[in-house]
Amino acid sequence: MDKIIKHKLYTIKRKIIKLLYEIKVFFSVSGKGKRYDFNSAKQYWQNVPKAMGSNPWNTEKLKYISDEILVVQFKEEQKISREKFERQLGYKRAFESIKDIDNPKVMDYGSGIGFYGFEILSHFPNAQVTFVDINQSNLNIIQRIAELLKFEQQITICQVQNKKSLDLNFKNTFNLIMSMGVLHHTPFAKDIVSHLTQYLDSKGIFLVLLYNNHYRKRLSQNKGYRLNHSTFGELTDPIIDEIKNPYSDWYDDKAIDLFGHNYNLISRDYPTPDYNTYRFEKF
Ligand SMILES: C[S@@+](CC[C@H](N)C(=O)[O-])C[C@H]1O[C@@H](n2cnc3c(N)ncnc32)[C@H](O)[C@@H]1O
């Protein structure tokens, strides 16, 4: 009996300590927020995630490796990506979005090394994929991989020069725009979605993967202070040669606001406690 009471008291004590810590973190100063700078983002993102997100590739350095090694490394990572649950789910949602379309046109917005776009090309022989990114060396590697894998007739690459993507201009529209792990890295996500919307077919799908508030809270509790967009950014992605990821946002269902009144939410998934995946259909 005594033991049970002792255990109960101990549990209550632990809960109170945890709550007090959470309150302390909540009222802590969030640290200096650095302003988002598009050029710093461009420089940072020359380091593109591998399948698991850590230990990124520097696409400038990839220039110097042989074609053979590049293909082997890319294929290895592609294989790993298919085992990683949030990517696996993203591929599945992307495939579902275009499965009934004969010649699907797809945009991989914020493509990194192009995992999502290449997955589409591997499964849909008639697909055309436009890879869009802020960093030209990322796109050059995509072009090289596409040539090596014989997809060059099916791809287009396109660099974004404007922080709100207002310079993007396409002749055709798309059946699917995928932006996986990208829009939380810019304060201009709403402008970007709004600009891209004109290039999505009616009934076309916009698929996104976004960080959520649980992720920010978890990292904040670990650190013991509140996080703002720049301090959250420093923690979500690795520091490389002392360069930090300048910006990360957290979304939860405020993602729905991003898409405003032009879209219906058609699926919502929580592949990990830190990420949410949403599919929106354009009216
Ligand atoms: C976390 S990586 C994700 C890459 C890829 N989608 C993947 O899942 O492997 C973020 C990518 O978004 C790109 N990016 C960052 N800000 C962007 C913006 N404003 N517009 C387009 N791409 C952006 C970066 O260059 C980088 O390639």
Image (cartoon, rainbow, N blue to C red):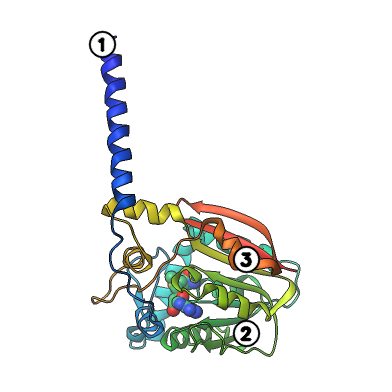
Tell me if mark 2 has few (under 14), some (14-19) or many (20+) residues whose alpha carbon lies within 10 angstroms of its own: some
- What is the x, y in percent for residue 170? 65, 88
On the image, the x and y values in percent for residue 178 come to 58, 71
Comparing marks 1 and 2, which lies closer to the viewer?
1
Please state if 261 lies on the left or on the right of 278 as rendered: right
Question: Residue, x 41% and y 87% (percent of image)?
Answer: 137
Q: Could you tell me how far apart the alpha carbons at marks 2 and 3 are, in whole angstroms?
A: 17 Å
- Left or right of 283 in this view: 6: left
What residue lies at 40% left-to-right and 80% top-to-bottom?
Answer: 70
User: Which part of the image, by quadrant, shows the C terminus?
Assistant: bottom right
Q: Residue furthest top?
A: 1
Residue kind at label 3, given as amino acid type = Ala
Query: Which residue carries the number 3 mark?
Result: 94
Q: Is residue 211 visible?
A: yes
Name the residue type under label 1: Asp
Describe the element under mark 2 as helix, strand or loop: helix
Residue 256, percent from left and from top: 60, 61
Q: Residue at x 67, y 81 (%)?
A: 199
